[in-house]
Amino acid sequence: MSLLKNLNSVQKQSVENTEGPNLILAGAGSGKTRVLTHKIAYLIERKKVKPENILAMTFTNKAANEMKERIFHLLKNQVNSLWIGTFHSIFARILRKNCEKIGYRGNFVIYDEADQRSIIKTVINELDFDVDDSLKPNSIKSKIKFVKNSNKTLEDLQLSGAIFRDEIFEVIYNSYQKHLIKNNAMDFEDLLLKSMDLFRLFPSVAEYYQNIFKYILVDEYQDTNRLQYELIKTLGGKNRNISVVGDDDQSIYRWRGADIRNILDFEKDYPECNIFRLEQNYRSNENILKIAHSIIRHNASRMEKELWTKNEAGEKVSLIITSNAGNEANYIVQKIIEETQKNQRNFTDFAILYRTNAQSRYFEEVLNNNGISYVVVGGIRFYERKEIKDVLAYLRVLINQNDSVSLKRIINYPARNIGEATVAKIEKYCSQNNLSLFDGLKEINKIEKIQNKKKLIISDFYKLLKKYIDLKDTISFSELIKYLIEDLGIRRLLKEEGTVESLNRLENIGELINGIDEFLKNHPDQSLEHYLENVALITDVDNWDRSANVVSLLTLHSAKGLEFPVVFVTGLEEGLFPLTRQMENEESLEEERRLFYVGATRAKEKLYLTSAKYRRQYGETTQGNISRFLTEIDRDYLDFEDLSYQKSSYEKNHRPKQKRTYKFSNSIAAKETSNNEFEQGMLVRHERFGKGVVNKVYKDGDDIKLNVLFSEVGQKKIMLKYCKLEKLS
DNA sequence: GAGCGGCCTTTTTTT
DNA sequence: AAGGCCGCTC
């Protein structure tokens, strides 16, 4: 009985109803994780289901870990045999065991986006196409991703009209896939796609897992794509004990292939299903819910529902329009300071949410200037840093010599005088003789037109790799990496460089080694392969320590599943580059409303909505307008403040602390020339940097650029088309 | 051929 | 922040 005593009646029903398909529609803050964890505990304790027969899939490692912890707490018992993890980690595990059936070796590597791009570039070079805009690696990459996530073949997609027929893309796609197989590598999508292939081609394997996974639970079901949907259907097809938890209003990953139909059509796919609606919100004050609802209710394709709460109405939500991003940041930091003083809040209580990672900059700056500690969650990921990728590339090659992407990465790292041209020659030799790049290195002496000096370097490099490949089975990989780093002299080189960046890199490498030691301490029996897989699938949100007393800065997407007493949802204007500019069609408009909804419902006690009238992007200032949200939002629960007349408080607060004055002589101030151009020596005023004197004027194509020495901020390069530069007489 | 400095562009959101 | 590109030097 004690297991269910903390649940409300709907939560209880959805926990107890273990058999058959279950759709649990769980609004924000309605106890979704609570239901999932209780259900798993209930299955184990009451229904005597073996933990190894339960599969629970989430989208983030963080969510998975949280669930593990809570289940442990409920059962007072560690259940290691539970299958619980992200989609990608679960299927990576299945593939490690079975991938040889579909033509991979068990030590396959997982390629991230940078690796993908590198392959795509190789492919484009090999195929010798005329490169135009349609062949940008990034757009090819997203197209490949789209195709893979759809769980249809390229042909099917073309026939159904989902994409245009594009022969060049077809060739690239096929060649890309061949390269991955040759390198014994999978991209993120392959982890799912190849699992699906495995099940399709080997029904006995599918059956094996169908029998293992007697109960399947899926978190954030609204964000599954067609491929994940199909995998769930395949695995659960036999027992049909599928419980999915989700909220169609929080589906914010359409661009990643998430198909909201998965949740909207669950009833059609599983006609015998039970539907439970968790509509009581335990998280937020009523005013916050009303505001969130007033926006989301405008979405046409959603299940009709409205959250309710027994919580108090609380303070009204504040909507603020500021003049620019700097003032927006100023306002927010001012409010944080006020709230900590008036309402006795800690910095941990605050979260600043924005649309794109790059937007954290202004907030960081102002927080810094006010001595407030903060943490940026996500952003540039640790494992995507250059120095980390370089070191990891060595490890990847040690376990998988076919990984030519990693090999190419390290062939001239640290610099050993091997350039593109030499690599190209080796690659050519390899493809002619059907060798992997690694084997090509071994035969370096047979390759023509390479200088003897370089042959020597390459064969030394090969010997070095060989030495560590042999060494890796005799010592722990923590020792292995330490020796390797010393051997390569990476530490020494970075120290000698002596710049801020290089010392940072040095620190990061130290951090990496700590991380490896930590990993080995926690998983003493696991191998280098396991470590690399762990690294490939982890994100910064997963590592985030919430115990420190700091303000949290994160994207709206990363904020899903989290809650904070005070939340700032920033950048509310539409029409600007980083925000809601994609509202041109109804579908994207709906997704933006859902994103707003997710952000707003993170708040427990107080919600601030902020926007800026003007925002700079790539040096350009654009005007936004919040009219759409203003017309939709319910003003009854809102305090509205227009501060956009405050023009320059940001600039005032951001002058260098010790004021440096750069001397320049007024006497050389030039007159405006007849053809309205700027000249050396001319006195000017910049909208942000103030007064200055032109040092140099030059042309770059049609663009006019100036070097200007400003008295306030020193020398700056100015692109005329991006700013207003006023001539002073 | 390789490497380096300088300058520009990129990019929504993530497993 | 980091990769691409150009022009320069060794």
Image (cartoon, coloured by chain):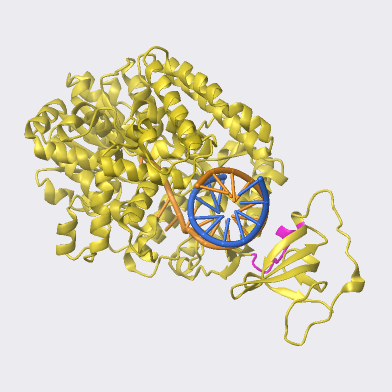
Chain colours: A yellow, B orange, C blue
Q: Main secondary structure of the magenta part?
A: loop
Question: Is A395 situated left or right of A103 in this image?
Answer: right
Question: Taking C5 as reference, is A107 above or below it?
Answer: above
Question: Taking A665 as reference, is A333 above or below it?
Answer: above
**Image quarter in which the N terminus of chain A is found:** top left
Which of A255/A679 is in front?
A: A679
Which of A113/A59 is in front?
A: A113
Report the number of discs. 0
Question: Is A722 situated left or right of A559 in this image?
Answer: right
User: Splitting the image into 4 quarters, where does residue A146 fall?
Assistant: bottom left
**Image quarter in which the C terminus of chain A is found:** bottom right
Which of A453/A215 is in front?
A: A453
User: Splitting the image into 4 quarters, where does residue A534 fall?
Assistant: top left
**Rendered location of residue A249, percent (x, y):** 33, 53
**Rendered location of residue A320, percent (x, y):** 59, 61
For the view shown, which residue lies furthest in the bottom direction?
Answer: A674
Magenta region: A643-652
User: Splitting the image into 4 quarters, where does residue A89 fall?
Assistant: top left
Q: Is residue A103 magenta?
A: no
For the view shown, which residue lies furthest in the top direction?
Answer: A474
**Rendered location of residue A388, percent (x, y):** 50, 34
Residue at image coords 57%, 29%: A490
Residue A640 in view in this figure: no
